[in-house]
């Protein structure tokens, strides 16, 4: 069977998959036991004997897609993973086909250039100037002002990378001599776990993660910040960075960046903004105010595979001064600018990864198909829908909403203990017609929807509540 024929079989299978999902036909989530799937998919035999083409491929894809979670179904409201634009999937195909591992320019000139273009666009949205090193000015880039960036395989890696850049500024010898034991990372108690994980990876230990004063929702309380920083310094600790959320994972709330930045600047503390989910509001003139003051930060991360409709994984690390990122993985960065005629820019100095996919192409295809205004309109729509959903939940007897949503995330719960919320979600997923997540916040367990799918409507949310009501009645009856 030729590649072209198999490609047609694959495309047909994907079209049918998308079609059913978009029509809400079947389950959003279907979890057969893994041991059964292993034999249904015939994994071991196919590896040993081959033959995955033609009719066999068609059968395999039917089984595979039957046990694949349908993000394209409008009743998908669970995790903060994009329902990618189909064009983004085409980019993934081009990337896989060409396999240009573009961390060095010569291994993928077009891929590296698209990455630069995407980073430039993001820097522009923040209000930081373009990266001189990425614009044919590598030879004297060190003396030039400008932002900088790199795309990584995910936000967790992006947070680690940004924190390494912060460490290089606070403790320039750390790369050669190890991390000083008095370094601490300051963050909101509502931070994403990848911050604590970065502390572990950097050898700092979890006790180096210090929670700054915050309100009940985990939003940083700026009024109490200066005294907190003074106390940290009095203890002999050295703040490596303060991490603010834009937005937080559980509740989707933004920290007041401008006020936090003022305190950080005053004390020379590196401000890192975790905008994995919420930085996308920068694309919308109507929502940009949520990140007011972000341009005063030192670094920002931004996942394109959350709100920019890129397929996984594609995250950006962005810094106000490009030189800081060049030191993240090297104390002395001068070797970057050798005499050799450099037609482009090598990103390899800025990443954990050595072999790196052309991930910029995926977000580029997602943006370039309809243009950035369409993405902005999508983000605005999803945010407005979240507010409508919150209003609807509040109107239902026995239902409560955690906070007024600032983004496309809503946490809600029914009267009753935490166990009931968890049991409700378990039963909901067993039925498989709706897919939602849960979160802990304000000392309670919540049911949580992240409205990632641009086709989700208020009617889907009403149908979700109706099904939860039926499940609640079942639970009460047992
Ligand atoms: C999703 C998220 C991350 C982690 O990003 P991944 O791409 O999943 O690794 C980090 N921080 C915040 C605030 C997030 O929402």
Image: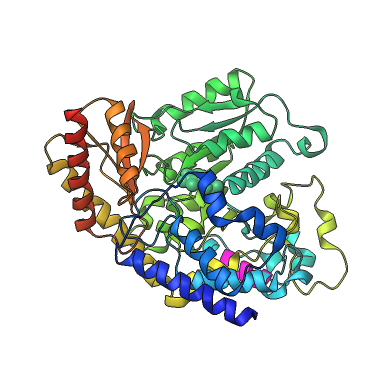
Residue 459 x, y percent position in the rendering: 19, 57
Q: Where is residue 111 in the image (x, y as percent from the top left)?
A: 66, 71
User: What is the quadrant of the C terminus in the image?
Assistant: top left
The residue most toward the right is 339
Q: Is residue 292 left or right of residue 304?
A: left
The answer to whether 335 is drawn above or below residue 227 in the figure is below
**143 or 388: which is nearer to us?**
388
Q: Which residue lies furthest to the top in this view?
A: 235
Q: Residue at x 47, y 75 (%)?
A: 12
Establish if 63 lies above or below 443: below
Q: What stretch is highlighted in magenta?
A: 112-119
Q: Where is residue 253 in the image (x, y as percent from the top left)?
A: 36, 43
Query: What colouring method underlies this structural image?
Result: rainbow
Q: Where is residue 51 in the image (x, y as percent from the top left)?
A: 66, 68
- Tell me: residue 5, above or below residue 297: below
* Residue 74 visible here: yes
**What residue appears at the point 32 percent right and 47 percent down from the top-left corner?**
449
Q: Which is the main secondary structure of the residues drawn in magenta? A: helix
State the residue in front, 173 or 353. Answer: 353
Q: Which corner quadrant of the image does residue 425 belong to?
A: top left
Figure check: 247 above or below 86 = above
Q: Quadrant of the N terminus?
A: bottom right
Check if residue 167 falls in the magenta segment. no
Q: Does the magenta stretch include residue 114?
A: yes
How many badges with numbers are in the image? 0
Residue 321 visible, this orientation: no
Residue drawn at (23%, 56%) of the image: 460
């Amino acid at each position: 069977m030729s590649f072209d024929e198999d490609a047609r079989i694959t495309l047909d299978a994907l079209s049918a998959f998308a079609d059913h999902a978009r029509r809400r036909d079947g389950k959003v989530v279907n979890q057969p036991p893994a041991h059964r799937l292993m034999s249904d998919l015939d994994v071991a035999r196919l590896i040993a004997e081959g033959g995955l083409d033609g009719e066999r491929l068609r059968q395999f894809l039917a089984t595979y897609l039957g046990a694949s979670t349908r993000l394209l179904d409008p009743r998908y409201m669970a995790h903060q993973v994009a329902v990618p634009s189909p064009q983004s999937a085409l980019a993934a195909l081009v990337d896989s086909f060409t396999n240009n591992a573009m961390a060095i320019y010569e291994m993928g000139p077009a891929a590296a250039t698209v990455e630069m273009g995407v980073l430039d666009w993001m820097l522009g949205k923040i209000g930081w100037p373009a990266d001189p090193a990425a614009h044919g000015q590598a030879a004297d880039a060190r003396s030039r002002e400008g932002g900088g960036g790199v795309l990584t395989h995910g936000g967790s890696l992006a947070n680690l990378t940004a924190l390494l850049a912060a460490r290089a500024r606070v403790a320039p010898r750390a790369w050669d001599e190890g991390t000083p034991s008095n370094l601490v990372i300051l963050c909101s108690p509502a931070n994403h776990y990848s911050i604590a994980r970065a502390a572990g990876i950097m050898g700092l230990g979890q006790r180096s993660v210090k929670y700054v004063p915050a309100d009940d929702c985990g939003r940083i309380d700026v009024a109490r910040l200066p005294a907190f920083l003074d106390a940290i310094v009095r203890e002999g600790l050295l703040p490596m960075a303060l991490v603010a959320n834009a937005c937080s994972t559980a509740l989707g709330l933004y920290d007041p960046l401008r006020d936090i930045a003022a305190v950080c600047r005053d004390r020379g503390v590196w401000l890192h903004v975790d905008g994995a989910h919420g930085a996308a509001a920068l694309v919308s003139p109507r929502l940009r105010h949520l990140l007011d003051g972000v341009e005063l930060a030192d670094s920002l991360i931004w996942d394109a595979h959350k709100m920019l409709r890129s397929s996984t994984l594609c995250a950006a690390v962005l810094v106000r001064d490009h030189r800081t990122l060049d030191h993240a993985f090297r104390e002395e960065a001068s070797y970057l600018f050798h005499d050799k005629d450099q037609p482009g820019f090598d990103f390899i100095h800025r990443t954990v990864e050595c072999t790196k996919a052309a991930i910029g192409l995926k977000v580029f295809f997602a943006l370039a198909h309809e243009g950035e205004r369409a993405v902005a309109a999508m983000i605005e729509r999803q945010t407005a829908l979240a507010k409508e959903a919150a209003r609807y939940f509040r109107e239902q007897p026995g239902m409560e909403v955690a906070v007024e949503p600032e983004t496309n995330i809503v946490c809600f719960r029914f009267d009753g203990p935490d166990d009931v919320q968890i049991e409700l979600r378990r039963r909901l997923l067993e039925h498989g017609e709706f897919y939602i997540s849960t979160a802990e916040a304000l000392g309670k367990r919540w049911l949580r929807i992240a409205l990632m799918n641009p086709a989700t409507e208020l009617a889907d949310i009403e149908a979700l509540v109706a099904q939860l009501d039926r499940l609640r009645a079942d639970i009460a009856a047992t």
